[in-house]
Structures are given as structure tokens and as C-alpha cells.
Amino acid sequence: MLAVEPEGPFSEAVAKIARMVTLSSRFQQQTNSVSDVEAEKHVHFKKAFAREEAKRPYAIVRLGQTFGYRKISGGASDVFVPFGTVDLHIEIDTPSEHWNSKLQAEMYAGNFFGVVMNEIVCLSGADDGADDSSHLVLQDVQSVDFGENPEDTWPTMGRFYRMLFQLTWGNFQ
């Protein structure tokens, strides 16, 4: 999925969120993928993405604006634990049967985004059997943008919705 292997907690967080997206059964279903490996074709990284070539639905994962280390004190020693944010942008086409109803179009998109995010949240901190590690521990998930593309672009781009999530991660237990 990446030409440069992630190394260190901040780039590993991006890779782990990308993997969690591919494991969403709703994301797999909407992308007509029969496995997480097939779903990888629909998950992109910010600098390696060409919107014109992508078929919706797709996800774009990138480092957020926040990352650092938090000191956790306990017992005889203190440890520094990495934390940060990852931005997750997802787009999905509006089926033609919903083009005449903004309410139905928004509900369709909202259902998709909500189920995918719920499946990602349910993976938080769970074991990932594929690489003998655990999924990223999420502390907070927020939608920071939701909307559809402008109506004047529908003839050339189709009608679609987008949602941007900000996921805050870090294992502070």
C-alpha cells in the first residue's frame, strides 16, 4: 500500500488507520471488495492521491496537525507515550435514485459514514492478527466537515458527499 514503509509512531498511526478502514465491512461492501486487501485500492495517502483517477467511495488518510509525547507517571518510573491526530477524508457517490431528495441523499451518505466510523471505533485497541500487533487506540473521533459537492459540478463530477473525521489516538492507560 505504501512505497515507503511507515516507521515511528506518527507514520505508523496513519498506516494503522488506513488498515482499519480496509477492515470495515461496509467500506468493503461499497467498494465491491471481497477482502481488506482489495479494499486497499480505495484507500489513499494525501501526497499519493489523484482525485481524477479515483473511483468513489474512497478514503484519504493523512497525518493530522497534532502529534507529540505525553508523560505518564506511575510506580517507580515515568514513560512518554506518543499521541496525535490522523485526518480521515471519505467520499461516496449519491445513487441516482436519491438525486431528487436532499434528505434521502444526506441520509444515504450519513448511514455510510456512520457505519464505517463505528466499525473503525470498534477496532480501537483490538488485536490485529495480520501483523501480530494491535489496532490504533483511539481516544476521540470527531466529524469536522460534512457536505456535498456543488450542484454545478454534478454533470462532470457526479453528485457525492464527503466527510472529514479527525481521530485522536494515544494509549494513556
Image (cartoon, grey):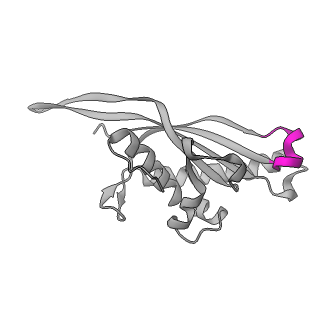
- Please provide percent x and percent y for residue 118: 54, 51
Question: Residue 84: x and y, percent?
Answer: 41, 33
Q: Is residue 126 magenta?
A: no
In this picture, which residue range is highlighted in magenta?
A: 149-159
Q: Residue at x 33, y 45 (%)?
A: 7
* 158 part of magenta stretch: yes
Name the one closer to the observer, 139 or 46.
Answer: 46
Q: Quadrant of the C terminus?
A: top left
Above/below status of 55 relative to 162: below
Q: Residue furthest bottom?
A: 34
Q: Is residue 24 visible?
A: no
Viewer-proximal residue, 130 or 51? 51
Q: Quadrant of residue 137?
A: top left
Tell me how many marks there are: 0
Query: Which residue lies most toward the front here?
Result: 3
Question: Who's the residue at 89% across and 48% down the image?
Answer: 155
- What kind of secondary structure does the magenta stretch mostly adopt? helix
Foreground pick, 5 / 99: 5
